[in-house]
Amino acid sequence: EDKVVQSPLSLVVHEGDTVTLNCSYEVTNFRSLLWYKQEKKAPTFLFMLTSSGIEKKSGRLSSILDKKELFSILNITATQTGDSAVYLCAVRSNDMRFGAGTRLTVKP
Amino acid sequence: NAGVMQNPRHLVRRRGQEARLRCSPMKGHSHVYWYRQLPEEGLKFMVYLQKENIIDESGMPKERFSAEFPKEGPSILRIQQVVRGDSAAYFCASSDGTKETQYFGPGTRLLVL
């Protein structure tokens, strides 16, 4: 069965720190990996990754995919309290499977 | 501990028929959220329910769509008189209400012919 595992499950840092969130997967017919930020209502789409080794960047957030080792990382540099949220990883194959999320808390 | 379960995983309906999507939350969770997946990879919030109560249905179309989460049994998202534009993946998530973490089910893919 398809599996998406995120680590750590929770993380507490201070403003200005850099964090790395991990997402590993085992799926058949991999198509893409997506990162979301979940705050209140619907998760906000961050990145979609389809190719290995190509970093995607948006401001202080960046992400990269390794299709050989079957994982992705989401980096956040110079964290701010507004980055506090649950970060979800989802993998699209024949279906779409979500990980359990990493709860990030950024303290002032 | 089984995760969030959704069924059916795939549902085909003809225009005008009814679609019923079911979501069984994780054990111990009494809060359920329904989302529709948008083509541009986003997720659109539809409705948030607790057992026997609709907490927030601001994302639900006013007509043809309804949701319930009875005291016993799964949450159901019901779409009456489906149209082709209803074709999408519908995801359910559950939480225990004390934390914001939502756990997502595998989704139901609805195809309206």
Image (cartoon, rainbow, N blue to C red):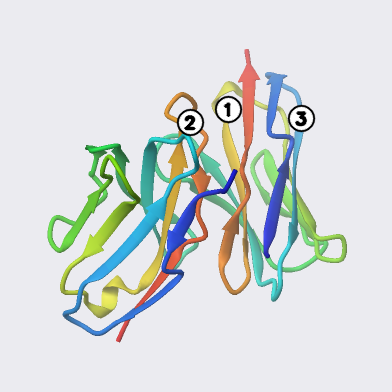
Residue occupied by mark 3: A18
**Secondary structure beneath disc 3?**
loop
Q: Is residue B101 above or below residue A24?
A: above
Q: Residues within 10 Å of mark 2 (few under 14, many from 20)?
A: some
Query: Residue at 42% of width from left, 45% of height from top?
Result: A42
Query: Residue at 21% of width from left, 74% of height from top?
Result: B82
Residue B94 in the figure: left or right of residue A84: left
- Report, in whole angstroms, how far the alpha carbon at label 2 lies from the one at label 1: 11 Å
Residue occupying the far right of the picture? A69
Is residue B10 at all visible to an observer of this figure?
Answer: yes
Q: Residues within 10 Å of mark 1 (few under 14, many from 20)?
A: some
Residues marked 2 and 1 touching at CB (< 8 Å): no
Q: Nearer the viewer, mark 1 or mark 3?
A: 1
- Report, in whole angstroms, how far the alpha carbon at label 1 lies from the one at label 3: 13 Å
Q: Is residue B33 above or below residue A81?
A: below
Tell me the subunit letter for badge 2.
Answer: B
Residue occupying the far left of the picture? B63
Tell me the subunit letter for badge 1.
Answer: A
In the picture, the disc for residue A84 is 1
**Of the image marks 1 and 3, the number of the one nearer the N terminus:** 3
In the picture, the disc for residue B100 is 2
Instruction: Please name the amino acid that badge 1 sits on.
Output: Ser
Is residue B44 at all visible to an observer of this figure?
Answer: no
